[in-house]
Image: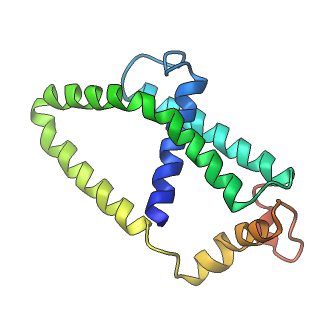
Amino acid sequence: MPFLAAAAVIAASYGSGRLLTLGGWLVAEDGLRRRLTVFMVGWLFLATVVFVLGYAHAFTRSVLIAVALAGVAAAIPFLPGEVRAARRAWSTAGWMRRPIAALAVLLALDVFLASAPPTSGDAIAYHLSAPKEWLQAGHVFPIWWDWNTFQPF
């Protein structure tokens, strides 16, 4: 399940970015630079939406799932074009196919390892304590007894 959630957030970031940049044509020429810029625009948008929802007392699991699904729905129309572009890039890669394939394997391994549930004390006590409190409360608030929660503010 964590893998699906992460995949949904990634797709939602890209879909939101494509909508906000009018299909990606407002940011840069076609290629990796444009796709990464579109992704970051969408990521910033989603982060801002979640931040605003947190202060509007709408920081609940169902609302966050709805935001992610809306972003995924925004990404779906762009998927066929992205698949065609990836195939075109692969066919013209020539000798770079092997390094690209090696990087893809490393990326897949990294995604697999990153989708494991948090088990370390650092992850549970430091990185996930504030989101847990906020989800339970339904909104973002200062947690005075936990200095780690003040870092993004």
Q: How many marks?
A: 0
> What residue do we see at 59% from left, 47% from top?
68
Residue 21 on image: x %, y %: 57, 22
Towards the viewer: 27 or 13: 13
Q: Is residue 122 left or right of residue 110?
A: right
Residue 5 on image: x %, y %: 51, 58
In which quadrant of the rendered image does the C terminus lie?
bottom right
Residue 30 on image: x %, y %: 38, 19
The quarter of the picture where residue 78 lies is top left
Name the residue furthest left.
Answer: 95
> What residue do we see at 55% from left, 18% from top?
22
Q: Is residue 3 left or right of residue 147?
A: left
> What residue do we see at 65% from left, 42% from top?
46
Q: Is residue 59 above or below residue 129?
A: above
Q: How was the colour assigned to the protein in this rendering?
A: rainbow
Towards the viewer: 95 or 90: 90
Q: Is residue 113 left or right of residue 93?
A: right
> What residue do we see at 81% from left, 71% from top?
147
Q: Is residue 100 above or below residue 33?
A: below
Towards the viewer: 8 or 90: 8
Towards the viewer: 99 or 7: 7
The quarter of the picture where residue 71 lies is top right
